[in-house]
Amino acid sequence: MVHPYVINTFNALVLVVAGLILYFGDPARSPTYLTAPFIGLLLLACTHHLRKHNRFVFNTVTALTLLVGLLVVWQIEPENFEWNRQSILLLLMGFSSFIAVAFYVGTFVQERRMRNNSIYKDDL
């Protein structure tokens, strides 16, 4: 299983890059598009603590990633949906966040089943 800090880094970079593309690609420059890059930077700041296996940060990152995934998907209007750059980038950010949450939960379950925390012995 991939370590959570790797998944967190990848997801945060997707949020930052796709959010900035949305913001600078839109002529109106809606400030709501800066929400995803801001949260992506917060997630990048948590990567160091995920490497140290801080449980509080791990749970906070999981909740924040799920929240940003929901917020990004809610920006898509289903009645006016069309396959343009905005919709594709929003779907990419939402999909990336939901996959990251699935990996976080999978890592947590795998660690609980091992009970001796040997999943991270190669990391320390």
Image (cartoon, rainbow, N blue to C red):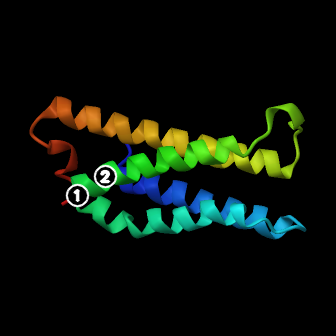
Q: Residue at x 61, y 40 (%)?
A: 95
In this view, the residue in front, 71 or 25, is 71
Q: Quadrant of residue 118?
A: top left
Residue 113: give x, y in percent of width and height: 18, 29
Does residue 115 sit above or below 11 in this rendering?
A: above
Does residue 38 sit above or below 82 in this rendering?
A: below
Would residue 43 be found to the left or right of residue 118 on screen? right
Q: Residue at x 54, y 63 (%)?
A: 40
Image quadrant where one finds the N terminus: top left
- The numbered dot on residue 90 is none
Element at badge 1?
Answer: loop
Residue 89: give x, y in percent of width and height: 74, 50
In this view, the residue in front, 5 or 30, is 30
Q: Residue at x 37, y 50 (%)?
A: 4
Q: Residue at x 71, y 67 (%)?
A: 20
Residue 10: give x, y in percent of width and height: 52, 56
Provide the residue designation for mark 1.
54
- The numbered dot on residue 58 is 2
Marks 1 & 2, CB-CB < 8 Å contact: yes
Residue type for callout 1: Asn
In this view, the residue in front, 18 or 66, is 66
